[in-house]
Amino acid sequence: MLLCVPLFSRDVYAYIGQGRLMLEGMNPYEQGISALPNYYRLGPDLMWTEAPVPYGQLFLWMASIAVGLTVVQPELSILLLRLASVIGVVLSAYYIHRLTVHVRGYPARTLWLTAANPLFLTNFIASAHNDSLMVGLALAGLYYCLKGSAIRGVALATLAISIKPIALIFLPFIGLIWAGRRAGWSRKLFYWASTATMSFSFLALLGWMAGIGFGWINGIFDRGSLWIWYAPVGLAGGIAAAAGNLLELDGGQLMSWVHRLGKIASLVIVVWQILRGSYDRLLHRLAIALAAVVLLSPMIQSWWVLWFLPLLAVIGIRDGGQTKAVYIVTIFFMVYAISDQLDVFPYMHPENLAWPLAIARILAATLSLSAGLWLVFFDPRTKHMFHSHHQQASRRLQSQPTGTDYRA
């Protein structure tokens, strides 16, 4: 996967374009990739060429270095950016293990559900998504805070934010860990303020050094009007739009309201998890907050699931329904990613090739779904994972951890 062409996503081509903008002295937060000559030949998806950039200052700096060192040679630029993603995978695996040991869970099982998960490997290596660095650094920051090294933890979490700012969600929980188990509101407010001051001071320094400021704020709050059918909020918005159009109402406006309600609901859940709950369940609360941001978005990408899956695995994905859910989600996204990426209409002449391409996509989806069903019901090496007798055997093999069981 390290040496193959990018699979399942074209985001890495957008990274190259944003790095090239930096080299040309332009601010990616203010100008899109379309400002570059021959930008279309760089390979980015057209929908992202004018979209606000949702990446942090450090990552844009890294992209510019990768593009500069390779003299805008796409294959070599991809290799350097993929190496950065592999570093993120290594960090993630290492700190998933350390966090699981810290909460006295089952490290081997946790690593199989996360770092060895094909969804994890394809999105973070084959697709070269920068989310791997964000996740690895954020988990590292969380670990060091739990071990009593709060300043190091805040620094690492800030580096995660400077890769992809969605990691901001980690900061208030890190502040709570720093404040301690018996902290009152005044102490919590003090450590929240201390955490925010340290983090944003460093981010401001990075923005000043790179000459691009805090433009990622526009990207993180503007998810655009994209939606997808398997996202619950996206599906609800699509149904509302269809019903509104049938009733001769403004379907687009109805969809926008549904999407906005989803965002408001996710914000309420995040704030509730920050403000309410026991100290012993801080990791649970953080996982719920991240899951709410993803699951209540009108658009869900497969790599977004990996923002919170490591935390769920660390605190304990139970045998039975929870483990099966991980299997099914993994199979679904692998199947969907394989078939959906045959959407190459922008590069063809639809009037001549529309039907052949549509048939190819249907064939790919059918074969992928058949492969998934084979794994679940027929393959003798995997079907047992979906049946209760396997779950019971797995429980018998696991030794009871000592001390507090954080998975309960």
Image (spheres, rainbow, N blue to C red):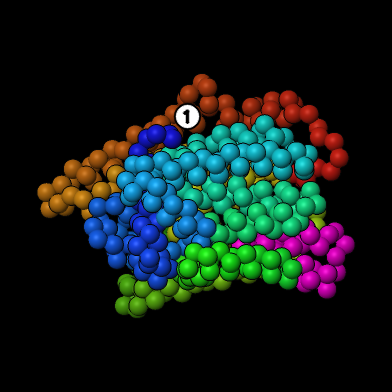
For the view shown, which residue lies furthest in the bottom direction?
A: 249
Please give the name of the residue rendered at 18% of the width and 49% of the height, measured from the top-left corner.
Answer: 348
Q: Where residue 238 sits in the image (x, y, percent)?
A: 39, 64
| Residue 185 is a magenta residue | yes
- Where is mark 1, residue-wise? 375
User: Magenta span covers which residues?
Assistant: 167-191
Choose between 92 and 198: the one closer to the eye.
198
| Residue 211 is a magenta residue | no
Choose between 20 and 375: the one closer to the eye.
20
Q: Where residue 65 sits in the image (x, y, percent)?
A: 44, 52
142, above or below 374, in the image = below
236, above or below 10, in the image = below
SS category of the residue bearing label 1: helix
Residue type at mark 1 is Leu
Please give the name of the residue rendered at 60% of the width and 56% of the height, measured from the top-left corner.
Answer: 159
Please give the name of the residue rendered at 27% of the width and 58% of the height, measured from the top-left corner.
Answer: 39
How many other residues sit within 10 Å of disc 1, few (<14), some (14-19) or many (≥20)? some
Q: Where residue 32 sits in the image (x, y, percent)?
A: 35, 66
Which image quadrant is residue 325 in? Answer: top right
For the view shown, which residue lies furthest in the left direction?
A: 352
Q: Quadrant of the C terminus?
A: top right
Tally of numbered discs: 1
For the view shown, which residue lies furthest in the top direction?
A: 380
Please give the name of the residue rendered at 53% of the width and 26% of the height, measured from the top-left corner.
Answer: 382
151, above or below 200, in the image = above
Query: Magenta segment, principal secondary structure?
Result: helix
Q: Where residue 244 sits in the image (x, y, percent)?
A: 37, 73
- Let me know if residue 296 appears in the view: no
